[in-house]
Image (cartoon, helix red, strand yellow):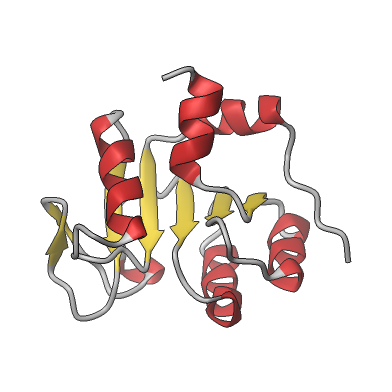
Amino acid sequence: MSFQNPSDTEIRDLLLRVKNIAVVGLSPHPDRPSFGVSRVMQQAGYRIIPVRPGVTEVLNEKAWPDLSSVPDAIDLVDVFRKAEDVDAVVDEAIALKLPAIWIQLGIVNEAAAERARAAGMVVVMDKCLKVEWRRLMKY
C-alpha cells in the first residue's frame, strides 16, 4: 500500500471545518505529547473531548471511555494510540459515521487508514495535528 495524505489545502479546509476534536488516548499527564498537542488545540479555540478509559477529566473536559459514549458531535478523531490499536478506533469511527480521523505523528497503520478513507472519512496519518495547524493556519 502507499497511503497518501490529503493536500495542504485539504488539511487546511478540514481544520477550518472542525470544532470538536475527540482525542483517543489523551493523557492527563502534562508531560505527554497528547496533553501538549490537545492543550494547544484547545487554546486555539477547538473543543477537546478526551477519550480514555479510567480517566474522569482532562484539560477541564469530561473524559469518555470510548467514542461511542461521547454524547456530542465529533468533527475529528485525533488518535494517540499504538499502530496496532488504531484498527479498533477506526472501526468505531466508521460505525459512528464520523467525518475525519487524524493518526498522529509516528503512528502508521495503512490498512486502517485506507479502510477509513474507503468509508468516506478524511484521513491524515503520521503527522502532528499541532504542527500542521501552526504551519497551515499561520499561527
**Residue 131: percent from left, percent from top:** 49, 38
Q: In this view, does 124 lie above or below 83?
A: above
In what quadrant of the picture does the C terminus appear?
top left
Residue at x 73% of width, y 39% of height: 6
Q: Which residue lies furthest to the right in this view?
A: 1
Along the line of sight, which residue is nearer the eye, 8 or 72? 8
Q: In this view, does 5 lie above or below 104?
A: above
Along the line of sight, which residue is nearer the eye, 11 or 122? 11
Q: Which residue lies furthest to the front in this view?
A: 31
In what quadrant of the picture does the N terminus appear?
bottom right
Q: Which residue lies furthest to the top in this view?
A: 138
Along the line of sight, which residue is nearer the eye, 86 or 35? 35
Residue at x 27% of width, y 55% of height: 35
**Residue 50: percent from left, percent from top:** 27, 60
Residue at x 78% of width, y 59% of height: 118
**Residue 84: percent from left, percent from top:** 59, 82
Lateral position of residue 58 relative to residue 99, left or right: left
Q: How many marks?
A: 0
Res. 64 visible in picture: yes
Lateral position of residue 48 relative to residue 138, left or right: left
Q: In this view, does 123 lie above or below 17?
A: below
Classify residue 51 by image quadrant. bottom left
**Residue 111: percent from left, percent from top:** 76, 72
Q: In this view, does 72 lie above or below 55?
A: above
Lateral position of residue 103 relative to residue 7, left or right: left
Residue at x 19% of width, y 57% of height: 30
